[in-house]
Structures are given as C-alpha cells and as structure tokens.
Image: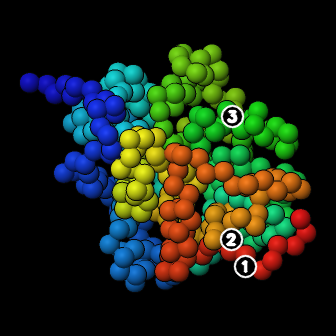
Amino acid sequence: MAETPMPILYKINFTKLPQWDFDDVYNQDAPPRPTACAQSLRNSNDENFKKAFLPNIRLFLHKDNINMSEWNRLSHFNNPFGFMEFRYNDVMKSVKLIPKPKEPFLLPKSGGDGCVHCAVVGTAGILNNSRMGVEIDAHDYVFRMNGAITKGFEEDVGNKTSVYVHTAHSITSSLYILKKHGYKAAPHDEGIKYVFIPEGMRDYQWLEGLLKGEKVSAGPYRNRLPRTYYSGQYNESRFYALHQEFLRYVKNRFLKSPKLNRKSWAMVRPTNGAFTLFLALHTCDTVDAYGFMTDDYMKYSNYYIQKYIKTKVIFYGNHDYNLEKNTWKDLHNRKVIKLYQRMEPESGT
C-alpha cells in the first residue's frame, strides 16, 4: 500500500517542545571533498565540539532528497525544523522544483593554501569604527545575512559578499525598514550564492514563484515577483535552500534554549545569523565571525548602520540572544572560530 501523509500535528497541542525518540537522529550526505587544509576546523581536537559536530549533515533541501516517509518524519517538528501543521501538497509544489546542487558549495581558491577561509559578517554595532573591512574582504568567501548593507560602511564591514543567507521576510522587509540607511537591494555580487531559510508557509509560496520565474500565487507576497529582489543575479545553479534536518541539528546540538520548555516554545529559533555561522562551519575550513554579539554588547548600537545614534539592543522573544552570545564566545575559546571582539573603550561615537 502506498504511504500517505500522516495526520497533521498541531503546535497548540503541546505545552513545550515535544520530544521524539528520533529527535537527535539526522540524515547525512556523502562526505564532502577531502580537505588538504591542516588548520581545518574539521581537524579540531576539542572533544565537546567533535561530539556535537556532524561534518556530513544534510545541508540543502532539494527535490531528490524528500519522499513520503521523510515528509512524515519531518512533520513531527515545527517550522523551520520540519513540517508540523503544513499540508503535503502546499509545501511539495515548491520543494519539487528545487534542483539538486551540482557542485560543491565552496572550493579552495586556486593558488591558495588548500583551505577555504571564510568570514561571516553579522550586523552588530561592534563593527562601527572597527576598520575591519580590508581584513574581512581578504577572506576567500564572505557570508552575510539580512540587511547586509555595505555601501558607506566599507571601511568597517568590507564590500564583498560571496554567500547571502535570507528568508522571504528578510529580503522583502529590508527594502522599507532600511531604506533610510541607503539600502536599495540585497547583495548581488557577480557569481554570488543565495541561501534560503524556509521558515514558514510564506517561504514555500515565495520559493514557488522564484523557481518558476512567476508571481507569488498566494500568501502575504501574493503578486510579487521574487526574481526582481535578486537584481539579476538569481541563478538556479547558485541558489540553495537549507534543509530542515540541518536547522534542527543546529538547534539541538548547539543552541538548545531553555525557552523551548515554555508555552511559547514554537516561536523560539536561532537567528538567521546563527544559521549562517553554522553553515560556514560546515562548508569552510576556517571561520572568522565579525559583527556578532559579544559580552560588551551594551557599549554599541544595535546595528552597525546606526553610526551616529546609539540604540539599545532589543531582545526579541523568538531568539535566545544570551545563549547565542555565549556559544560564539565558547567556540572562540575552543579555537573552532575566531570571534571579533573589542575589549578596548569604543572611540569616535
């Protein structure tokens, strides 16, 4: 008998994050390219990191790696970690359009040392007057997410973007939220790779329009043309969607918040910046993080684009900022990443 979608589970029926016996079991893909890089974080001797880290975790969702039994397993997890509350046909009409990536996500630069060196640039105010731009752009690849404004801030944040991580919400809302700071469009460097976080039904609706080259047919982005948001750089071979498996693994193994034991558990998830940093950890040999929250975050503005006004950092209920801040510091202390920190008094503003 053919397998059919399981009955829909509803978040309202759980007073905290439900636990399943397959909660910490993940699909893994074939090992990526063998690295010739001696200082690769994959060679870390840190026992805690080695225990948690799955170098071959399934990173990307595409039409060939989801079937009915996968759907049913992932339907036990709330979005963005799975398909709880979603209907099979609503989601699958876009997932069935996502092509399988044909090439490795990132490769060492020719003539280099055989390593893939990456910078991940967050949006925190710690980058104001940091003069880190040249250092950031010297990396093989630069990851950015959300607003990612570089024009006018090059000296502090660089101007190169190799990988841009976004949701439908972040690529559309940045246009009006950040307009006053000079934002005109999402990064669109030549050859850029776009990585999409499917966080809700509106993202699958966006995906369908994007992949078909048509207007979105339903939901909050109805009648919008997704391809116009990528400034001519959208290319099927350089577009990736993160897999629910990877998102869940990041939450379970590295960022399991006590907030998941509360009634509001279903809204709690890592930030886009956190998912971007972990994507880099799984695709690069060395990772340097800039513009992420550090212990002295109260000294700085919320965002580096707020150059002349100091705003308080806002802690939204759907993220656990303290947990993320402590995780970045911990990974830095274990020499897994290098976290840009400024312990000297802030000058200038």
Amino acid bearing label 2: Asp
Amino acid bearing label 1: Met
The residue to which callout 3 is attached is: 173
The mark nearer the N terminus, 1 or 2, is 2
Disc assigned to residue 296: 2
Disc 1 to disc 2: CB gap under 8 Å: yes
Instruction: State left or right for residue 44 relative to residue 68.
Output: right
Disc 1 to disc 3: CB gap under 8 Å: no
Residue at 60% from the left image edge and 75% from the top image edge: 338
Front residue of 212/313: it is: 313
Q: Quadrant of the N terminus?
A: top left
**Figure disc tally:** 3
Q: Does residue 155 lie above or below 265 as drawn?
A: below
The residue to which callout 1 is attached is: 343
The quarter of the picture where residue 18 lies is: top left
In the image, which is nearer the foreground, mark 1 or mark 3?
1
In the image, which is nearer the foreground, mark 3 or mark 2?
2
Residue at 53% from the left image edge and 80% from the top image edge: 333
**Do we see residue 139 in this rendering?**
no
Q: Residues under labels 3 and 2: Cα distance?
A: 29 Å
Front residue of 91/346: it is: 346
Q: Residue 55, image x and y in percent?
A: 38, 65
